[in-house]
Image (spheres, rainbow, N blue to C red):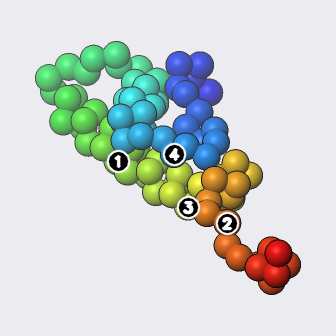
Amino acid sequence: MCRSIKTLRTGAVPATDDEIAAAALQFVRKVSGYRTPSAANQEAFSEAVVAVAAASKELLSAVASTHPDARRAQPNEATPASAAR
């Protein structure tokens, strides 16, 4: 794992779009070996960043509800035991 890529699924607060985009950019830089791509590769590089960001956002949306802190942050639903109090 690239050390400069931040873990985005860390708690109850969801990652922002900017954080997801920054992680996607770092990932594409690592995989491609380019910090800044040449003009000939710029379009492919940019498309890859958008695709990785979209996949990351989809993944984070799917797994967010399984994080223990995320479950605690959700509004409490009345259960029969708590409703009786």
Estimate the spatial distance between the alpha carbons at disc 2 and disc 1, rounded to whole Å.
35 Å
Q: Which mark is residue 62?
A: 3
Q: Callout 4: few (<14), some (14-19), or many (20+) C-alpha neighbours within 10 Å?
A: some
Residue 16 locus on image (x, y percent): 41, 40
- Marks 2 and 1: which is nearer the front? 2
**Which residue position holds label 2?**
76
Q: Earlier in the sequence, mark 3 or mark 4?
A: 4
For the residue marked with disc 3, what is the amino acid? Ala
Residue 11 drawn above or below residue 68: above
Residue in view at x 16 percent, y 27 percent = 40
For the residue marked with disc 1, what is the amino acid? Ala
- Circles 3 and 4, Cβ within 8 Å, touching? The answer is no
Estimate the spatial distance between the alpha carbons at disc 1 and disc 3, rounded to whole Å.
17 Å
- Marks 4 and 2: which is nearer the front? 2
**Which residue position holds label 4?**
14
Q: Earlier in the sequence, mark 2 or mark 1?
A: 1
How many numbered callouts? 4
Estimate the spatial distance between the alpha carbons at disc 1 and disc 4, rounded to whole Å.
19 Å
Residue in view at x 43 percent, y 26 percent = 26
* Residue 84 shown left or right of residue 68 in the figure: right
For the residue marked with disc 2, what is the amino acid? Asn
Residue 5 drawn above or below residue 68: above
For the residue marked with disc 4, what is the amino acid? Pro
Secondary structure of residue under mark 4:
loop
